[in-house]
Image (spheres, rainbow, N blue to C red):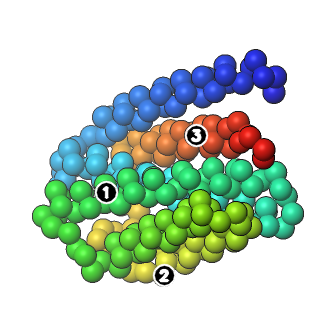
């Protein structure tokens, strides 16, 4: 890409992120109140959609890490980009999950298996980021990304879900909920993709 076009391209991505953020807010507002949860269902569904996207970013970081380790050097920055997206997004998801527990169910179930998984994954992701910052070992952190992604999926598939039923949005059969939920997932995925491009195509550090 010509040097003169790079600032315009980045500005376009910033605008796209802002517009997608507005679209996400509109879709959240379109979710109708639930019979049991009322308007708080918007918080629960936003948390669910964000978690889906976060699982996708962890997975992409892991897959791209494996591709990088097997010889595709061009995927290194893309894997690192999704690594840097995944960690702060998981912090946000953890906060949303705790908030929804507290506001809707009146307390936090600290011994809930998936909540424990949340904190474990957060700690592991922090370790991987710390290793990237302290040591210049991109293949090691790439392998750890893949391990983290595999562990995430294994825990999601194996751990019991005591907090709420599986796929509550889709089991409702109501497209007033399903439609906005899928729209939120798509918008958040697009935001993550735009941020990944910004990170992966950041200017090369001097001497790299």
Where is residue 38 shown, x and y percent of the image?
Answer: 18, 48
How far apart are the alpha carbons under marks 1 and 2? 23 Å
Where is residue 142 shown, x and y percent of the image?
Answer: 69, 66
How far apart are the alpha carbons under marks 1 and 3? 21 Å
The tag earlier along the polypeptide, 1 or 2, is: 1
Question: Is label 3 in a helix, a strand or a loop?
Answer: helix
Where is residue 109 shown, x and y percent of the image?
Answer: 23, 74
Q: In front: mark 1 or mark 2?
A: 1
The tag earlier along the polypeptide, 2 or 3, is: 2
Question: Height in image: 182 above or below 150?
Answer: above
Question: Is label 2 in a helix, a strand or a loop?
Answer: helix
| Visible residue check, residue 174 | no
Q: Which residue is mark 3?
A: 195
How far apart are the alpha carbons under marks 2 and 3? 31 Å
Question: Height in image: 100 above or below 150?
Answer: above
Name which residue lies at 72% across and 59% down.
64
10 Å crowding of disc 3: few (<14), some (14-19), many (20+): many
Disc assigned to residue 158: 2
Disc assigned to residue 95: 1
Instruction: Tell me which corner region of the image, top left, top right, bottom left or bottom right, holds residue 103.
Output: bottom left
């Amino acid at each position: 890409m010509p040097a003169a076009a790079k600032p315009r391209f980045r500005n376009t991505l910033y605008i796209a992120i802002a517009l997608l953020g507005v679209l996400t807010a509109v879709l959240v507002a379109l979710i109708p109140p639930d019979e049991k949860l009322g308007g708080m269902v918007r918080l629960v569904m936003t948390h669910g959609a964000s978690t889906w996207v976060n699982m996708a970013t962890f997975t992409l970081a892991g897959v791209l890490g494996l591709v990088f380790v097997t010889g595709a050097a061009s995927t290194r920055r893309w894997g690192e980009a999704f690594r840097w997206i995944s960690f702060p997004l998981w912090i946000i998801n953890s906060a949303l999950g705790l908030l929804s527990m507290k506001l809707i169910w009146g307390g936090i179930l600290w011994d809930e298996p998936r909540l424990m998984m949340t904190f474990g994954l957060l700690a592991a992701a922090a370790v991987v980021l710390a290793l990237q910052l302290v040591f210049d070992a991109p293949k090691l952190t790439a392998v750890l990304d893949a391990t983290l992604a595999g562990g995430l999926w294994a825990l999601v598939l194996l751990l019991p879900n005591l907090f709420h039923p599986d796929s509550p949005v889709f089991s409702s059969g109501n497209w007033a909920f399903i439609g906005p939920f899928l729209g939120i997932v798509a918008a958040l995925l697009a935001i993550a993709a735009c941020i990944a491009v910004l990170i992966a195509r950041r200017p090369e550090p001097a001497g790299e």
